Image (cartoon, rainbow, N blue to C red):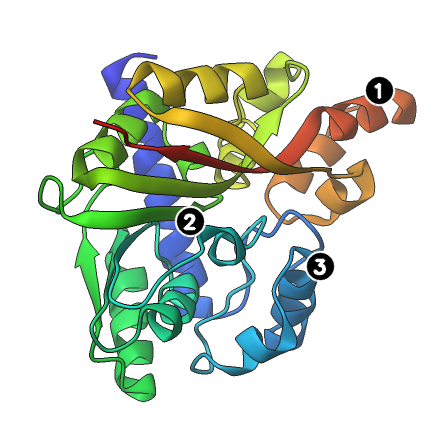
């Protein structure tokens, strides 16, 4: 992908998430249409692995229903650890992580959308989180020091980057030796049709930005991660994708037979994957 194309994608993604932050509710969930406010965001979160106790423990407005899994459940966070969240959004996973690492731990949320960072900081103040910090920056060039994090997490965000290898390389850079990467993301089991792959709306919806599952795993290994393994994998039926306000636009405008659309839906999966930095 050319540099100009990458910058255009980032620009559109940033604009899309700025709108999300301002509207407070509408989002890019892959499970059900998100334009129903907080209750729908909560329902979405339960479907992808969050518990009632977790949802009730964060400030109101932190959960926008943006994820495709629960990386916190897999991260096995310990007291005193430093955690970096890639694409922190309004701070949902950061606040959950903060509760696990305790006062001696530290959470750094990175997001490239100023409106999201502002919203996350507001939520942090509401919840009196003294061990959480939000930084404006791109996940391809993180404003985080080398060898400073015990854990890097991300929830359906690396998918949005046009240069995923660089993101994984950055995650490897900021992790301490022995550190771990825990990611929930969207990948493909089969290539998408060209008109969906080229759709900006579907890209923001994490559909056209998806790469093949094997390529995703291989990229993690190429930058240095070891003991890479998929912890969980879930296929998203086409009816869920069709309800998404972004990916649904690209899919519903096609004249493809329903059988073909179902095949596309079965090609898109959510995975939870981990890798370790061993040096």
Q: Which residue is mark 2?
A: 16
* Alpha carbons under labels 2 and 1: distance apart: 28 Å
Q: Which residue is mark 3?
A: 47
Q: Nearer the viewer, mark 3 or mark 2?
A: 3
Q: Residues within 10 Å of mark 3 (few under 14, many from 20)?
A: some
Kindly check if marks 2 and 1 are in contact, taking CB atoms under 8 A apart as contact.
Answer: no
* Left or right relative to 207: residue 78: left
Instruction: Answer with mark 2 or mark 1, whichever residue precedes in sequence.
Output: 2
- Location of residue 191 with respect to 51 vertically, above or below: above
Q: Quadrant of residue 268?
A: top right
* Alpha carbons under labels 1 and 3: distance apart: 26 Å
At horizontal 36% and vertical 64% (from top left) the residue drawn is 94
Give the percent coordinates (x, y) of residue 277: 28, 32
Query: As rendered, which of 101 and 47 lies closer to the eye?
Result: 101
At horizontal 26% and vertical 60% (from top left) the residue drawn is 81
Q: Which residue is mark 1?
A: 260
At horizontal 21% and vertical 73% (from top left) the residue drawn is 131
């Amino acid at each position: 992908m050319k540099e100009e194309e990458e910058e255009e994608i980032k620009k559109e993604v940033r604009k899309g998430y700025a709108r999300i932050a301002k509207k407070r509710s509408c989002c890019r969930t892959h499970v059900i249409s998100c334009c129903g406010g907080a209750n729908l965001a909560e329902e979405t979160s339960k479907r992808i692995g969050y518990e009632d106790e977790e949802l009730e423990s964060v400030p109101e407005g932190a959960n926008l229903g943006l994820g495709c899994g629960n990386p916190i459940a897999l991260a096995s966070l310990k007291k005193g650890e430093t955690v970096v969240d890639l694409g922190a959004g309004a701070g949902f996973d950061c606040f959950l992580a903060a509760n696990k690492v305790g006062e001696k731990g530290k959470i750094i949320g990175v997001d490239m959308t100023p409106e999201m960072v502002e919203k996350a900081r507001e939520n942090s103040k509401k919840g009196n989180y003294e061990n959480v910090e939000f930084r404006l920056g791109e996940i391809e060039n993180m404003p985080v020091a080398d060898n400073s994090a015990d854990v890097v997490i991300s929830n359906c965000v690396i998918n949005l980057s046009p240069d995923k290898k660089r993101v994984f390389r950055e995650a490897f850079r900021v992790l301490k030796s022995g550190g771990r990467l825990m990611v929930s993301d969207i990948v493909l089991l089969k290539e998408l049709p060209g008109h969906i792959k080229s759709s900006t709306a579907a890209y923001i919806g994490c559909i056209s930005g998806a790469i093949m599952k094997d390529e995703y795993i291989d990229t993690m290994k190429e930058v240095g991660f070891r003991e890479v393994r998929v912890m969980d994998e879930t296929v998203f039926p086409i009816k869920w994708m069709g309800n998404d306000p972004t990916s649904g636009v690209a899919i519903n405008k096609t004249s493809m037979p329903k059988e073909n659309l179902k095949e596309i839906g079965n090609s898109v999966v959510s995975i939870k994957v981990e890798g370790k930095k061993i040096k």
